[in-house]
Every structure is written in structure tokens, then in C-alpha cells.
Image (cartoon, rainbow, N blue to C red):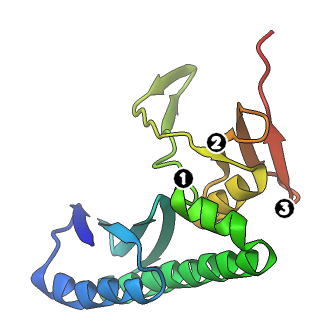
Amino acid sequence: MRINYQGRNTPITKTFRLHAEPRIQGLSQHFDRITDVKVVVSQQRHLFTVEITVNADGTLIRGEDRSPEVLTTFDRALDRVERQLRRNKDRLVERGRHNRAEVAERADSELVTAEQDESELITEQDDINIVRTKSHVLKPMSPKEAALQMDMLGHDFFVFFNGQTERVGVVYKRHDGDYGLIEPEIG
């Protein structure tokens, strides 16, 4: 498992690494296919923000927290990641009880793929300035799987390739808490 640390407006201290590494290594007890972990620590004024992104066999799981103490912030963000890993593993086990053949087939061809990062847009007055462009691999999944992946990442939308219709789709979270699906058509 590779661990990548990144500091924004704050250095990554040796104390932080000594605190974080054994806890991150412990994530493998929940899911043994974790390939890499990215930890981003940023500081604005007196608040630290820790974002932890785990790549578990193509499934991205993300946890974030913010507080004035960096080690506490890290622990709470890691707790969120652990809960999501457990929930994901429980879903896979439950799904396996209903249809073991389908789970075995998915395990062979990668479980779920996630959007690596959402594009960041900054609007200045009437001008739209695209300051960052991201890309990710679209792998076939169902709209329900895409919605689960979106929730695990904490995003408001998720672009995916619908394996049932063989078209690109977007799932999004509606204001009422439900989910929506956009399937574009070329006109």
C-alpha cells in the first residue's frame, strides 16, 4: 500500500507521519485490496483540514474533517473512511448472499470505479474561468452503483458509463434527498 502525503499551507511533520502511518496500515483489515492512500493536510487560519482518499481496488473512498488540532482531525477523517470501508464490505457480503456468481464476476473485473476529482469552477463576475480539468476512466456500472460511489466520495454528482444502456450517465443528489439520473441524447 502506497501512502502519499501532501501539505497545503502547512508542512507534514514527522510526528504526523508517525501518528498516521500505523492507523492507515490498519485499514487493510477492512479491505485487503487497498492499493494507495492519499492524505492531504491543509491549514487556513487556525483550522486544519484533513482529506483522506483510499483507492480500494478501483473504488475510491473519501473522508474529510476540519478542526483546530491536526491529529484529532486526521483521526476523525480516518474514522469516516473506516466506516465507509466497512459499509462497502458489508454491501458486498450482502450482495454475495443474494447472488454469489455476480459478486465473483465483479471481483474479477474490478468492483466500481470512481471519479478521481470533480472539476473546480471559479466564476468571476460574468466570466467563467475553468482553472482545473480532471479526467477519469469510465467503467461499466449500474445507476445504483454510481449513486453508492457518489455517496462514498461525498460528491453531489457522479459521471459513469451505464453498463445496461451502454451510454454515459450522470447521477446527482436532489435537494429533497433523492437521486436523479441524467442520460444525454445526441440530437
Decide if residue 166 is in sight here: yes
Q: Work out whether mark 2 precedes mark 3 in sequence or the reverse, and give the earlier one.
A: 2
Within-10-Å neighbours for mark 1: few <14, some 14–19, many 20+: many
Q: Work out whether mark 3 precedes mark 1 in sequence or the reverse, and give the earlier one.
A: 1
Residue behind mark 1: 113
Q: Position of residue 6 (x, y in %)?
A: 23, 62
What residue lies at 62% left-to-right and 60% top-to-bottom?
105
Where does the C terminus fall, quadrant-wise?
A: top right
Q: Could you tell me how many numbered marks the image carries?
A: 3
Residue behind mark 2: 160
**Towards the viewer: 49 or 38:** 38
Q: Work out whether mark 2 precedes mark 1 in sequence or the reverse, and give the earlier one.
A: 1
Residues under numbered marks 2 and 3 in contact, where contact means CB atoms less than 8 Å apart:
no
Q: Amino acid at mark 3?
A: Gly
Q: Label 1, secondary structure: give it.
A: loop
Res. 177 mark: 3
